Image: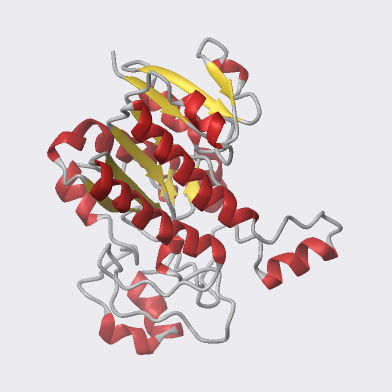
Amino acid sequence: MTRVLITGASGRFAPFVIDALRDDYELVLTSRTPPAERYADLPWIKADITQFDDCRRMVEGIDVIQHQGANPYPSDHPRIREQMAESGRDLPDLGYTMQANIMGPYYLLMSAVEAGVKTVVMTGSNCAFGQGYRISDRPFQVKYLPMDEDHPSDVEDSYSYSKLAGEELLAQFTRAYGIRTYMTRPSGICPEDRLRNMAANAKPCEGWSEWMFAYVPSVDLASMQKLIMEQADSLPAHDVFVANALDSSLLEPTMEVIERFRPELAPLCRGISGHDALFSPKKAQRVLGWEQSMSWREFL
């Protein structure tokens, strides 16, 4: 049976990957802290991906890696650091995000090559476009909507850069060593309770959001990453997939909000109707056969 390593097993998203895979694969979990008690029957390796020796230890006998471990924000972002200081929280090292999100995957990939791992699927972020954590006053440069995998990136912060760089790091290892590598670009990852909360608190839009009203159900991101893993042999050796719901988080039709708050973007829109999302998962639909299984709207 195929042996799959799931990193970041104690995080918020990894349980959905575990649940999607556990009936069909032999799983090994790894994280710095123990995963949920319901996974006590699965082998767990206490490890830190920023330590090369830990990575070598965790990949022994592994066929496929599903990599979720990451720092989820830019540790050097000026406004985030100000907010943390104001709330009395300890400030992380400036380079913490870069270490966790770039050196961690590098050590993991190098260990994977040494161990003969066949495929790596990594959870990235749509922040690789650069639209969210802006630092300068320069607005994000939208070229067309909805954005897909070919849209140019315009990143300014360490988290967004780390996710964009992570895609190229995977591609580098594919070019150099032949290992099959894939990355998703999810938007806000939502378990069911968050979808229900979105519905319970839904109200008319009052302004534009740099996050562009995007989300993806956790179960649907997990299903996409399972499909990538299972179809890897028939896919290009390296690829990237936007992972977004088909609909937005808006109550109003998408074009209505664009025309009201960002009318200059209206001429850049391609075939947007109804509640269509501003990030396109059409490539995943076409190539993988992926489909969205739930929406926050079903809880309205």
Judge whether residue 50 can be spotted in this image.
yes
**Which residue occupies the foreground of this view, 101 or 149?**
101
Which residue appears at 23% of the width and 41% of the height? 178
Judge whether residue 214 can be spotted in this image.
no
Q: Number of callouts in the render?
A: 0
- Identify the colour scheme used: secondary structure
Give the farthest residue toward the left: 234
Rendering coords of residue 247 (x, y %): 34, 57
Which residue appears at 33% of the width and 28% of the height? 64
Above or below, comparing residue 299 to residue 7 in the picture: below
Above or below, comparing residue 260 to residue 152 in the picture: below
Rendering coords of residue 158 (x, y %): 55, 64
**Which residue occupies the foreground of this view, 117 or 243?**
117
**Which residue occupies the foreground of this view, 175 or 190?**
175
Above or below, comparing residue 64 to residue 293 in the picture: above
Rendering coords of residue 215 (x, y %): 44, 54
Q: On the rendered structure, is 87 left or right of 280?
A: right
Give the farthest residue toward the top: 41
Which residue appears at 40% of the width and 40% of the height? 109
**In the picture, residue 51 is in which quadrant?**
top right
**Which residue occupies the foreground of this view, 129 or 93?**
93
The quarter in which the N terminus is drawn is top left
Give the farthest residue toward the bottom: 264
Rendering coords of residue 299 (x, y %): 47, 45
